[in-house]
Image (cartoon, rainbow, N blue to C red):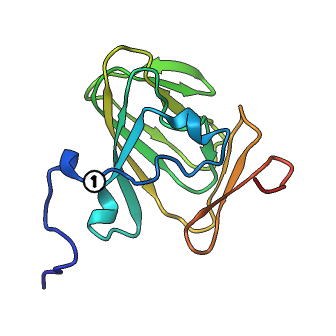
Amino acid sequence: MPNDRYPTAIVAQEAPPRTKPSNYPEPFASRMAGREKRPLGDLFGLTNFGVNLTRLVPGAGSALRHAHTKQDEFLYILAGHPVLITDAGETTLHPGMCAGLKAGTGNGHQLVNRTDEEVLYLEVGDRTPGDSASYPDDDLQAVLDGNGKWQFLHKDGSPY
């Protein structure tokens, strides 16, 4: 039985971008300038995992370098040549490449666009309750609350 609330199919690049560019508190949110996410999974009512079509302009980053305790992440590069930064070092990616980032490893990761061309990629992550994230390069930690919203704290546990 079809659901009139959700589309059957869409052109991904025509999906509306996220209205709030970043959930991070300042001074971190402004560091996400040049990143645009189109939450594709939400448009279809998906609840077990999220899918974003993400665009990075030259100089932009995907996120602060972070590691999840429970959320696996998967990236598939559609266009451009971002650098994947992990605890193991840096890897330049190109269209057709993918990367899997396993939860619970503590391996901090992020993509950075160091080129003069845009980067476009799909990111997929699960929505496991009780997830948290650490940020090895910043005074930040995040905890997913019971309503599925991220709460950001300093590393000492005090709120932003």
Instruction: From the top left corner, tell me how far across and down residue 74 is, in percent.
Output: 41, 44
Instruction: From the top left corner, tell me how far across and down residue 115 is, in percent.
Output: 38, 14
Instruction: From the top left corner, tell me how far across and down residue 47 is, in percent.
Output: 39, 70
Q: Hey, which quadrant is residue 86 in on the image?
A: top right
Note whether 58 is above or below 120 in the view shown.
above
**Nearest to the observer: residue 134 or residue 118:** 118
**Residue, disc 1:** 16
**Residue drawn at point x = 58 percent, y = 42 percent:** 29
In the displayed orientation, state which residue is furthest to the bottom: 1
Note whether 96 is above or below 17 in the view shown.
above
Instruction: From the top left corner, tell me how far across and down residue 14 is, in percent.
Output: 19, 49
**Nearest to the observer: residue 45 or residue 56:** 56
Note whether 26 is above or below 78 in the view shown.
below
So how many labels did they put on this image?
Answer: 1
106 left or right of 60 in image: right
**Residue drawn at point x = 25 percent, y = 29 percent:** 96
**Residue drawn at point x = 13 percent, y = 61 percent:** 9
User: Which quarter of the rendered picture does the N terminus lie within?
Assistant: bottom left
Mark 1 element type: loop
- Looking at the picture, which amino acid does disc 1 mark? Pro
Mark 1: few/some/many CA within 10 Å (<14, 14-19, 20+):
few
Q: Hey, which quadrant is residue 135 in on the image?
A: top right
**Residue drawn at point x = 72 percent, y = 35 percent:** 136
